[in-house]
Image (cartoon, rainbow, N blue to C red):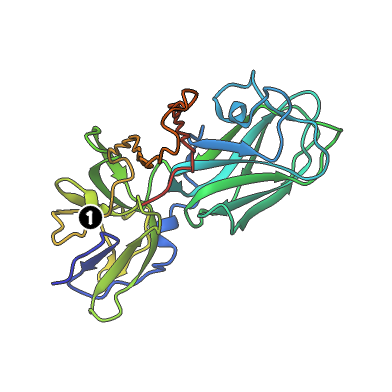
Amino acid sequence: MSKSEGKKIAIKFSDRVMGNLDMLPKLPLITGKFTSLKGYFSSSSTYSTYYPSNAFDGSTSTMWYTRTSGEQWIQVSTVRPIRLGGFRWYVGSSYRPKEFKVYGSNDGINWVELYSGTSDDTAGWKEYYWQYGDAFLYHRWTITSRYSSYIYLYEIEAFMHDQKAIRVTGLQRDYVRGDLKEIDYAIKSIEHHPTEENTILITLHDNYQEAFDEVEGLLTIEYKGQLGNLIGYGGALEDFIVSFSPTDLLQSPNPGIEERLTVSANTTSILVPITYHNIYDLNETIRVVGLSFSTQLIYSSIENP
């Protein structure tokens, strides 16, 4: 048996299963809640100390502020890919954004447009919704026009699932000797198995963290019939929970593994023979020249193994 990277799960049923499998990981389309996002925050520009992180700190008293003209953007990179169904932002009494677009990306380079709209010229919370789509690691809000010369953006909250039609969960550690915590793996796709009858194939997100190769204990698949769209010959599928222990996993390198950097000095001395031509020259001297060493450590960024 070949080793598995922990990216795919096959579920075999007693009879054929029908339904829109492509939509299943994105259901339900409406339910969710607004929440502040956690991760790494950045922006196209920032004025003074009004950092982009201020727009995600859970407070409407702090803000991201830019004086730069033209299109401006603010974005968040989350630890795990997330699937949004909308967002809301809080704007103040002045310097409000107008037209904007929301994008998603998994590499910070290639972007998919999720939504475009116009924020009205009044203060307070503004809410925007769309159908749940794919999960992304990066989300960017690009402001293409504004009502005045500057932009004040006080807070952004994402509209996310509080319930899912289908979930894959397990216990993993984010780093070596870290605490065990439940991981709700991001599902990339669900489809009929290409070779096995009455079987659906679940594929997890491409992100290296969305693999159960490091799972400890059981992996659990939960389906909620009231939220999903799976149908069998006898009608809609009822709720089910299946737990199992995956085997023959090929574990990937843990990015949190301990590393040790050792720095040492290595010197080489060369003795050069001296030929004396005049042994009575009292001005002849041998001078010892001191040696000095310096070491420079250069930060090269964090590399994903």
Residue 66 position, x and y percent, is: 75, 31
* Residue at position x 80%, y 29% in the image: 95
Classify residue 4 by image quadrant.
Answer: bottom left
* Residue at position x 27%, y 62% in the image: 237
Dot 1: element: loop
Q: How many labels does the image show?
A: 1
On screen, 286 above or below 6?
above
Q: In which quarter of the image is the N terminus?
A: bottom left
Classify residue 56 by image quadrant.
Answer: top right
Question: Which residue extends farthest bottom?
Answer: 195
Which residue is the site of mark 1? Answer: 251
Q: Nearer the viewer, residue 181 or 192?
A: 181
* Residue at position x 51%, y 53% in the image: 132
Q: Nearer the viewer, residue 154 or 237?
A: 154
Q: Say whether residue 286 is left or right of residue 183.
A: right
On screen, 256 above or below 242?
above
Residue 52 position, x and y percent, is: 63, 31
Residue 233 position, x and y percent, is: 26, 73
* Residue at position x 58%, y 21% in the image: 59
Q: What residue type is labelled 1?
A: Gln
